[in-house]
Amino acid sequence: MTTQVENPFMLGLDSNFYLKDEFESPEKRTNVTWFYPKICAFQDSLDDEAKKAEYFSFLDRQSHPEQTDILLYFHIPFCEAFCNFCACFKESAAKYQGERQKRFVQAMVKEIERNARSRYFRGTKIKYVQFGGGTPSALEQDSMATILEAVHREFDLSEVDGISLEGSPLGLSKDGYIEMLKSLGITRISFGVQTLDPEIRKKLTIKATVEQVHQTAENIRKAGIRTFALDLMYNLPGQDDEVLAKDLHGICAELRPSFVQTYRFNQWEGTRLDQQIRAGKVADVKPSGAIEREQYRQIKQGLADYGYDKQLLINFFTHLDDAGEIGLNHACGGNGYRASYTLGIGPAAENYMGERSYRNHTDVERWMREVEAGIIPIEQGRICSEDEVENRVMVFFPVFGTVRKADVANFEKYRREVDWLVEGGYAVETDEELTLTQVGRENAGNIAFLFYSDEEKARARRTMYLSLKNKRNPFHQDAQNIPRTPLFLQTRPKTADEDAAGGAKTPGEGAPTKTPAEGTAAPERS
């Protein structure tokens, strides 16, 4: 039953797209939106080749608008080890070695060539390049070099502001790896620390040691990489205020990265970790909305105390006076109407191009087969309405914390929402811009959801419903991190026959969970 509320703007969704009946509540802090308009495997399937051809006819029918920036995003879906806290699409790097890795790299190059040589992209200048995953550094040096060389060869990078790569201490610590990245134009490296507490790292199945974290940070500096960023997660199971304070000190005072990216812990419904936490098997202190709010405030103050007082995005902090460009600026629309597009390459890569949202196959083998056959390897796609295109800048404005009215196609369209935010103390409006207050920044995800179209709100709720109904992860509607043993079989007592046969399989036996490696905090960017 849905609780009735006085103000219709006080409806939101949490990280799993549950309906909220309050705007600001200790248990109701919503994820920031990193990809919009969203797509859903169950609502936007695009498996008919004729429809797919029509959908992508714009690639050879028109050229790219010069005033629109492009973020070129590569999804490398391999991890040396699986952590258990996130739902990103990935496969074990051990499965893709030798000839299988070569085949994957060849498919990446072919997809690069197909896009770059289309009429739409021919001669287009790329604004930013970002490698995510998965863990891109799980690829062998020759493989990564081949992909980077193809990017430089096929796309115009003459005005690129940066090339960024997410990695893990496990891969980045290989001899010569960081030096190779720099030689091929990488200007920024990021990897996930998440926490420096050894016990919590063990429970989250983070394989890299704290010592490897420190050594990798030092190696990045020695190699002369322009900037590097570290991820810090909060509201982790067992991460009390004292542990978080130590994490802040270790990252800011000892590792001293150029940027600190903060991410809330997402306890995705139905995942193995979710069930373990609910059963009390992970930590005495469980994640909660109240703890999350308090730790968000602790992080902001702690970062400022260490000199990371420049908040570039809602979760992005630096001590640099001249921080330069950040890829997420472009992924989130560039803070302007039709300001930037995202071209995604690789399995599960998401795209926003020409008012089209689409996603590549969340299946490495199928993605490779279709690329090799000359088929555009997507599984979902939709053409966004003009209303959704207009809303995009306002949905993303909380990521930036401010928006210029001149960069909104029709600012007065949102007058009721804006007035409500100002009256509630969540934002300040001037003649030129709308800016979030501190309490507004704390509720940035909730505020973003105010600007979803009615259709998008309904779609989001249906995505959650269909994901749970089909036993799929709500993030990409795939099987990542979802236990294959039904819950009732995990909890019921063994029968006499099972005892005699050696016992029923415990949850997870014979079915390892697939979760993202270190360096890929739950992509807040979906």
Image: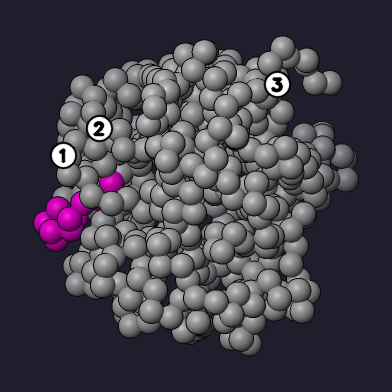
User: Within the magenta stretch, is there residue 227?
Assistant: yes
User: Within the magenta stretch, is there residue 374?
Assistant: no
Q: Amino acid at mark 1?
A: Asp
Range drawn in magenta: 219-229
| Marks 2 and 1 in Cβ contact (< 8 Å) | yes
Q: Amino acid at mark 3?
A: Pro
Using the image as rendered, state which of residue 447 and residue 190 is in the foreground: 447
Q: Residues within 10 Å of mark 2 (few under 14, many from 20)?
A: some
Q: Earlier in the sequence, mark 3 or mark 1?
A: 3
Q: Is 331 placed left or right of 372 in the picture?
A: left
Q: Which mark is residue 321?
A: 1
* Residue bearing the label numbered 2: 310
Can residue 504 be seen in the rendering of this structure?
no
- Mark 2 and mark 3: span between their CA atoms? 34 Å
Using the image as rendered, state which of residue 259 and residue 418 is in the foreground: 418
Q: Earlier in the sequence, mark 2 or mark 1?
A: 2
- Mark 2 and mark 1: span between their CA atoms? 8 Å
